[in-house]
Amino acid sequence: MSPTGPLLLLDSASMYFRAFYGVPSSITAADGTSVNAVRGFLDMIAQLVTDRRPGRIVACWDDDWRPAFRVDAIPSYKEHRLAADGGEEVPEALKPQVPIVVDVLAALGIARVGAPGFEADDVIGTLVARELAAPAAERADAVEVVTGDRDLFQLVDDAAGVSVLYPAKGFKNLIVVDQAVLAEKYGVPTGTAYADMATLRGDPSDGLPGVAGIGEKTAASMLRTYGTLAGVLAAVDAGELSATQRARIGAARAYLDVAPTVVQVARDAPVGEFDDAVPTVPADPETVAALAEQWNLGGSMTRVVEALTKAGQ
């Protein structure tokens, strides 16, 4: 039997980047290292565990932030984020904090899971697919994806119990994104339709050009009429759209042939086996204490340990 409570899937990089920009940079360790992202990340987990009462929890990780299969399809994918060394451009004050996050998660006993050649989004998509494929008696009550990245709205599925917890105004006021929210905010009925809308619209922040002249509202309107991206393309071929829209989509046909591979999260990333139980006691209490002392994590570490302990009561 699966433990009572949702399966909580954390988009780790989204969370610690948000913490980095949301928590004062004046918070440092004794050696001057900034720890605002670590402190904020821990406080987010404490808040989530307290409010959502998960039965299982996974910190999903970017083993590859710019996978080759996406770059091969669309070379501009995340190109603007490339640093001079070919890696991801990350603020200097954040770089040393990421290994601390890794150490803290290990000491707490929270599963940190990535997949070679894939992004955290793909790990999340794969874990959602696995959960929904499991026998009913073994599935969580619900699956809740925690992210500040709207790309993962494509996973929303009311019937399957999959929602996204989106921190529009911080982690104390999360928006629970379900199909009603997708319909209200974006004019699309399902997570799958959201992915198709995002493909048509494009996303400059990810280097995805989209179809020139087709924005979010127009894309949503097309999908309401024709159902799917494939339906829209079939309508173009049948001459059912306006001449202008047919020309726009025709000019972007090469992009649309490959974009779904880039926009849609993988559901079959090579994610190994791991223990996703909520750790009601730290896996390594001595290391937890040492990390809290070394990195001035104080109250944040205490709060997350207390939240995890209460989750098991």
Image (spheres, rainbow, N blue to C red):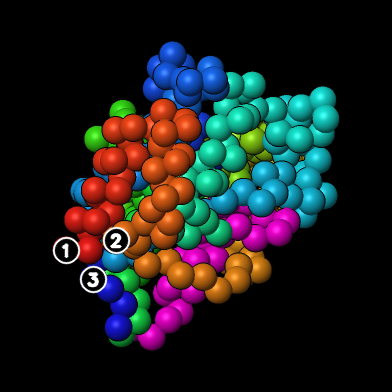
* Quarter of the picture holding the C terminus: bottom left
What amino acid type is highlighted by mark number 3?
Answer: Thr
Examine the rendered structure and indicate whether residue 170 appears above or below residue 8: above
Count of numbered circles in the view: 3
Determine the CA span between mark 3 and mark 2. Answer: 14 Å
Q: Which residues are magenta?
A: 114-136
**Image coordinates for residue 111, horizontal then vertical, percent:** 47, 60
In the displayed structure, would residue 95 be above or below residue 150?
above
Label 1 residue SS: loop
* Residue at numbered disc 1: 313
Q: Secondary structure at mark 3?
A: loop
**Where is mark 2, residue-wise?**
280
Between disc 2 and disc 1, whose residue precedes?
2
- Mark pair 2, 1: CA separation: 8 Å
Q: Is residue 126 magenta?
A: yes
**Amino acid at pointer 1:** Gln
Residue 208 placed where, x, y %? Answer: 67, 37
The question of residue 289 being in magenta is answered with no
Where residue 14 appears, as percent x and y from the top left, is 50, 39
Residue farthest left in this picture = 313
Distance CA(mark 3)–CA(mark 1): 12 Å
Q: Which mark is residue 4?
A: 3
Image position, residue 39 (x, y; %): 40, 32
Q: Quadrant of the N terminus?
A: bottom left
- Residue at image location 79% in from the left, 51% down from the top: 68
Give me the residue at 57% from left, 27% from top: 94
